[in-house]
Image (cartoon, helix red, strand yellow):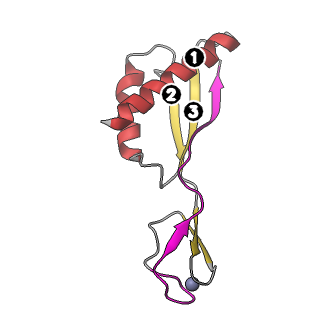
Amino acid sequence: MHEISLVQGLLDQLHSIARENNAKQVLRVTMIIGPLSGVVVESFEFGFDILSRQDDLVRDAKLEIIIPEVTYRCSNCGQEEVTSRARPAQCAKCGDRILIATQGDDLILRQVEME
Ligand SMILES: [Zn+2]
């Protein structure tokens, strides 16, 4: 599962942030996972659940995931539609089916609370 290695990368990152700040425990982690990032949120949460249990630093950490909205721009008329749900089937204005996503593939560690 692809997400396990992403979670492992996140934990490595948390360990180095904790070292820099002399923190002993991570309380809360906020991630931004774009709907087009290819990351399955449920798998990411599952992986975090499994791996954090074996890790003193993050054992009690709460994982929060923010799914940002994506802007789809019509290639024909330029109409934009903003949604955090699935890609619209067609342009609401002219009916064109070629909609181009302008963002939404982010995977970002946004905030960490530690003590
Ligand atoms: Zn259009």
| In the image: residue 77, left or right of residue 59 | right
Count of labels in the image: 3
Q: Which residue is mark 3?
A: 29
User: Dot 2: within a 10 Å radius of its alpha carbon, few (fewer than 14), some, or many (20 or more) residues?
Assistant: some
Q: Which residue is at the front of the view, 73 or 5?
A: 73
Choose mark 2 or mark 3, whichever is in front. 2
Q: Which residue is mark 1?
A: 25
Q: Quadrant of residue 27?
A: top right
Q: Is mark 3 within 8 Å of ligand 1?
A: no
The N terminus - image quarter: top left
Q: Residue 51: horizontal and vertical position, in percent?
A: 38, 24
The stretch in magenta equals 90-114
Dot 2 amino acid type? Leu
Dot 2 or dot 3, earlier in sequence: 2
Q: Which residue is mark 2?
A: 10
Dot 3 amino acid type? Val
Q: Kindly state the secondary structure of the residue where label 1 is placed.
A: loop
Q: Residue at x 48, y 76 (%)?
A: 98
| Ligand 1 quadrant assignment | bottom right
Measured Cα–Cα span from mark 2 to mark 1 = 15 Å
Q: Residue 103: horizontal and vertical position, in percent?
A: 59, 57
